[in-house]
Amino acid sequence: MSRVGILGSLFHPPHMGHLRLAETATTFLALDTLLFVPTAFPPHKSFNDLWGYEVRVFLTKIAFCLEPPEELEISAQKLGKFPPTSLASLLAVYRRFYHPCPGWKLWEAEKEKTKPAYTIDTLKKYKLDHPEDEIFLLIGQDEAAVFHTWKRYEEIFSLAQVCVGTRPHAAEFPDMPFVKLPPFEVDVSSTKVREAWLKGENLSGLVPETVQVALESLATNR
């Protein structure tokens, strides 16, 4: 039996909060595997996808070092979003940044979805294929606050331990059987990053360096 974390998100884009959540959960929960699951179509919000699913998957790979540099270069070329000079700069940063965490993997469970995907369905899909594994669903405090609105949320607790990344001095969230992870000092959201990107502002400190370089290239070439 393996201890498996699942971190699903739009990753629109992945940011430092996602990275700290992944690091904290991996250590605190002693995870054998952590699966990063990019959402194709979110069920809870209207969604203006700035870059498209495939770009968000690519950003997820470079944020969490999910692909060796040689394979990432091929992925980037297939994506066709980065001019040669920009791609060379991105790959140079990625090679320097690349320190993969054992057990961290990309799981494109929702890749073929053409309609909103629900967490309950993703968990059941994993549990069907891996009935012996112990599942830890990772969410942020903002998600915990509205967890009661998720589809069949009570059933989710029967499939996984729901673990919440917390911030120091943040407001309390609903009284549900959540597992609170140790707090980490990161106050960033994908919304904040997107707004800064659209304004052409510096993204340093908001996202991993690799994601910053990729987003700067996408801004220049959009």
Image (cartoon, rainbow, N blue to C red):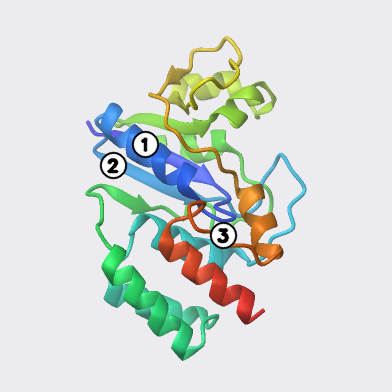
The alpha-carbon separation of the residues under discs 1 and 3 comes to: 22 Å
Marker disc for residue 112: 3
User: Which residue reaches farthest top?
Assistant: 175
The alpha-carbon separation of the residues under discs 2 and 1 comes to: 6 Å
User: Which residue reaches farthest right?
Assistant: 46
Q: Position of residue 192 (x, y in %)?
A: 65, 49
Q: Residues within 10 Å of mark 1 (few under 14, many from 20)?
A: many
Question: Mark 2 and 1 residues: CB-CB less than 8 Å, in contact?
Answer: yes
Q: Position of residue 85 (x, y in %)?
A: 45, 88
Frontmost of labels 3 and 2 is: 2
**What residue is pinned by disc 1?**
5
Q: Position of residue 126 (x, y in %)?
A: 41, 40
N-terminal of the pair, mark 2 or mark 1, is 1
Q: Residues within 10 Å of mark 2 (few under 14, many from 20)?
A: some
Above-or-below relation of 19 to 58: above
**Mark 1 element type:** strand
N-terminal of the pair, mark 1 or mark 3, is 1
Q: Residues within 10 Å of mark 3 (few under 14, many from 20)?
A: few
**Mark 3 element type:** loop
| Residue 114 seen anywhere in this rendered image of the structure | no
Residue in view at x 25 percent, y 47 percent? 103
Q: Amino acid at mark 3?
A: Glu
**What residue is pinned by disc 2?**
33
Q: Amino acid at mark 1?
A: Gly
Marker disc for residue 213: none
Q: Amino acid at mark 2?
A: Thr
Q: Position of residue 163 (x, y in %)?
A: 44, 25
Decide which of 115, 149 is in the foreground and name it.
149
